């Protein structure tokens, strides 16, 4: 890292945080640290890091700092380890290489997900790639105490940037092997995906706050407009629309 490396790194990090803070205003209940968590599954939340905002694709994993922040927000790494790991590899070629590889992995996973949602099938190439990633970056287990009992928990080493693939590869494998593709779908109104965990399995939107209410309000407005053409009654104020 050059002499101006730390300064440049901190400037980029601050700019990224300002952007995420602005995006988070869309719906605080669905965003955490500037990222959407509406998928009900780690692999889906990862895919959802490139949503559409104002009709345009918006990359949320813009740099190394935002990638680490997503891992912290996903509770895959704690805050102290995350900051140390982020600073250790900031501006490094390894970090940038991993970030680009994450983008590619995510978009390939998105394509596989759309196909799997349609017919429940996965390409043999995808299976080989996931198995290779899990072999190269395995999730490990350790025993720890929890009150008066002992439990085993999964973990992965933070030694180099590519280690970040460990939880994502396993999450993608679990997604395809454990979930019903009929219960995993894309929002009817945007590009976000989610696992429908409702009892009757009829969830249509990524979130009622993000898309559900928007669709309902638009439908209500359309019906009301149609009624007005027939009755020629005064137009209802948008402020009186039901939630």
Image (cartoon, rainbow, N blue to C red):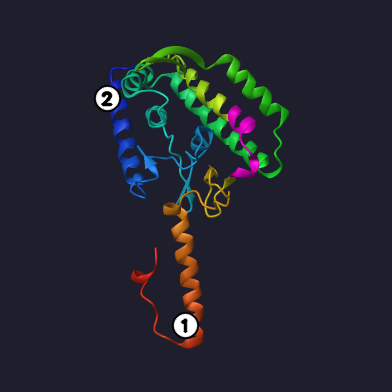
In this image, 190 relative to 30: left or right?
right
Q: Position of residue 154 (x, y in %)?
A: 48, 18
Quadrant showing the N terminus? top left
Q: Position of residue 32 (x, y in %)?
A: 37, 39
Residue nearest the observer in this picture, 221 or 160: 221
Quadrant showing the C terminus? bottom left
Residue nearest the observer in this picture, 220 or 131: 220
Q: Classify 10 Å Cα crowding around label 2: few (below 14), some (14-19), many (20 and above).
A: few
Under circle 2, the secondary element is: helix
Which residue was labeled with disc 1? 228
- The magenta span reads 173-184
> Which of pointers 1 and 2 indicates the residue nearer the eye?
1
Q: Magenta segment, principal secondary structure?
A: helix
Quick check: 125 above or below 21?
above
Q: Earlier in the sequence, mark 1 or mark 2?
A: 2
Which residue is drawn at the image coordinates 62% and 24% (left, top)?
A: 130
Which residue is drawn at the image coordinates 39% and 27% (left, top)?
A: 68
Q: Position of residue 60 (x, y in %)?
A: 43, 38
Which residue is drawn at the image coordinates 47% and 63% (left, top)?
A: 216
Q: Is residue 174 magenta?
A: yes
Q: Is residue 160 magenta?
A: no
Q: Classify 10 Å Cα crowding around label 1: few (below 14), some (14-19), many (20 and above).
A: some
Quick check: 132 above or below 37?
above
Contact (Cβ within 8 Å) of mark 1 with mark 2: no
Which residue was labeled with disc 2? 7
């Amino acid at each position: 890292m050059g002499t101006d490396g730390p300064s440049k790194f901190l400037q980029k990090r601050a700019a990224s945080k300002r952007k995420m803070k602005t995006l988070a205003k869309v719906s605080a209940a669905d965003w955490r640290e500037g990222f959407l968590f509406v998928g009900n599954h780690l692999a889906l939340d990862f895919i959802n890091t490139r949503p559409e905002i104002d009709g345009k694709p918006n990359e949320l994993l813009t740099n190394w700092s935002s990638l680490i922040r997503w891992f912290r927000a996903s509770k895959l790494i704690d805050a102290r380890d995350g900051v140390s790991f982020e600073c250790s590899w900031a501006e490094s070629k390894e970090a940038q290489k991993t970030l680009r590889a994450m983008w590619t992995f995510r978009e390939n996973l998105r394509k596989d997900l759309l196909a799997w949602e349609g017919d429940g099938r996965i390409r043999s190439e995808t299976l080989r790639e996931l198995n290779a990633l899990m072999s190269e970056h395995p999730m490990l287990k350790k025993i720890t105490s929890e009150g008066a009992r002992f439990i085993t928990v999964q973990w992965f080493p933070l030694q180099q940037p590519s280690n970040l693939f460990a939880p994502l590869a396993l999450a993608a494998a679990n997604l395809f092997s454990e979930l019903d593709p009929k219960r995993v779908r894309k929002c009817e109104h945007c590009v976000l995906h989610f696992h429908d965990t409702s009892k009757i399995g009829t969830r249509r939107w990524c979130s009622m706050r993000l898309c559900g209410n928007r669709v309902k309000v638009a439908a209500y407005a359309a019906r009301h407009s149609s009624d007005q053409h027939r009755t020629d009654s005064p137009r209802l104020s948008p402020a009186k629309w039901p939630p």
